[in-house]
Image: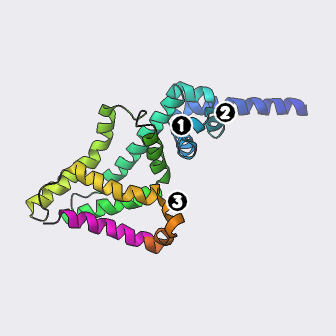
Amino acid sequence: MQRVRSSASEEDAAEQPRRSWKQDPHGVRLNILQVAREAFAQKGLSGARIEEIASQTSTSKRMIYYYFGDKEGLYREVLADAYRRTREAEDALELDGLPSDEALRKLAEFTFDNHRRSKDFIRLVMIENVHEGRHMPDSTEMSGENSSAIRLLEDIYARGLEAGVFRPGFSAVELHWLISALCYFNVSNQATFSHIFGRELFDEDGQTKLRRHVGDMVLRLVLA
């Protein structure tokens, strides 16, 4: 009798991924993306294994292939989802009601904080640059995902020009590049920089100072 109960329990466990997929396919897909994001950020495209990813999800390897086709398809979707989450966080800032200089500072300092919190996103970007951007979603999809960042800066900069607060001569893409570069280095080069110069800039006081410096530098660049 004990053996029969054990067999039934094993059947229930084996059936669980299929029930989860049917009852909550969106949740299963998000679970796969989260686990895969961590795996690709830590091990890269070549080092991550579908078997390892599947073992940490609530579904099976077969369902990962069903949703994403193959490992490269999963990796591409992880990249697209990472960019999408960053843009959604930027959209939630509600900068329209702020004066243009305050809005620009808030966006720059938010980017610093968000990159710092999202180290796996920065690692994914680093890894994809090693691959020369070959796995990025197509330009139409990416422009749609990333247009919000440019749209925010276009609006802030236009308001600043109209108010006489900002000087002319910049594009939103240039400002996005400058902000991204300052905030990206803080995460991408933290290990090597701290190994050479110590970790003082990466404790809480150091990060608070750098965050403020990023806002100051961006503002001083564009202020009239």
Check the image and report above or below for 144 versus 121: above
Tell which circle, 3 or 1, labels the residue nearer the N-terminal end: 1
Range of residues picked out in magenta: 207-224
User: As shown in the figure, which amino acid type bears the numbered disc 1?
Assistant: Leu
Q: Dot 2: what SS?
A: helix
Residue 196: which numbered mark, if any? none
217 relative to 29, above or below? below
Which one is in front, 39 or 125?
Answer: 125
* Mark with earlier residue (2, 3): 2
Q: Position of residue 191 (x, y in %)?
A: 52, 59
In the image, what residue occupies the spot 11% across and 59% down? 161
Q: Residue at x 39, y 44 (%)?
A: 83
Identify which residue, 23 or 34, lies in the foreground. 34
Q: Which residue is mark 1?
A: 45
Q: With 205 as the anchor, is 24 left or right in this view?
A: right
Q: What residue appears at the point 45 percent right and 46 percent down from the top-left corner?
A: 126
Quadrant of the rendering where the C terminus is positioned: bottom left
Viewer-nearest residue: 202 or 94? 202
Circle 1: element type: helix
Q: Position of residue 13 (x, y in %)?
A: 72, 34
Distance from Cα at disc 2 to Cα at disc 1: 29 Å
Pointer 2 residue:
16
